Amino acid sequence: MNVHPLTALMAEWLPDCDFAVLNHGFVTHGRDYQLIIQDCISGRPGTHRLTFTHVVRADCQTALAPSGWSTSWDDVFLDWERSKDMDGYIWGTNWSNAYPGITALNDDAEASDWGRQIGRPMYAATLETDRFKLRLIFHAVRSEKIDDDSSLIRQVIIPLKA
């Protein structure tokens, strides 16, 4: 049995929660899905690119309840400075906190079915943030450290001392 690539990455350095998702979506060619994250609690703090390869399914939906949408509908919530003292969800932070976080889904029936049809191992994972819920079915995941910047996530996450 193959080791889930996300499990391997999490064992190496990727925390399961409390990292900032700065950007996410399909890359230009449309096969792979990319996350730009910022982390301050692992042994590799900084900004990282996670690339999920050979993505056959990507589902993204809101994590906000209807009441959150109702109170945050106006475009003023796209601007941090103008909305920071208002009641509602502030979209203008331009990032979301990975909580409850990222999960490798072992023995996922749909990923197994894709794997049988393609003839290559396929895996499933979810990522839940304060803003969205994402589910991916993919073949592999690569990580690349972009830089040492973790200044954004350090404003809200205080690493616990071991």
Image (spheres, helix red, strand yellow):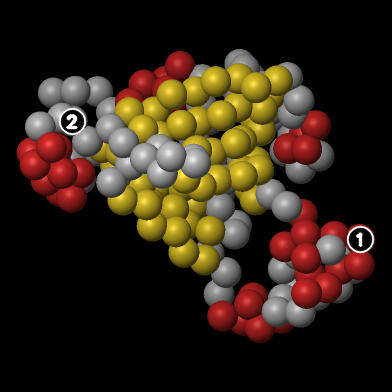
Quadrant in which the N terminus is drawn: top left
Label ID, residue 124: none
Q: Identify the residue at image location x=60%, y=36%.
A: 36
Residue drawn at the location 53% of the way across and 64% of the way down: 63
Q: Residue 150: x, y in percent?
A: 74, 29
**Amino acid tagged 2:** Pro
The picture quadrant where one finds residue 45 is top right
The kind of residue tagged 1 is Glu
User: Which residue matches tag 2?
Assistant: 121
Is 42 on the left or on the right of 95, as rendered? left
- Tell me: residue 152, above or below residue 60: above
- State yes or no: discs 2 and 1 in contact (Cβ < 8 Å): no
Location of residue 9 in the rendering, given as x and y in whole percent from the top left corner: 42, 23
Residue 33 appearing in the image: no
Residue 12 figure quarter: top left
Q: Secondary structure at mark 1?
A: helix
Q: Identify the residue position indicated by label 1 in the image.
A: 81
Number of residues whose C-alpha sits closer than 10 Å to that of mark 2, classed few (under 14), some (14–19) or many (20 or more): some
Please report whichever mark, 2 or 1, sits nearer to the chain's N-terminal start: 1
Point 50% across, 31% down: residue: 50
Q: Nearer the viewer, residue 19 or 79?
A: 79
Q: Write the residue at 11% across / 46% down.
A: 113
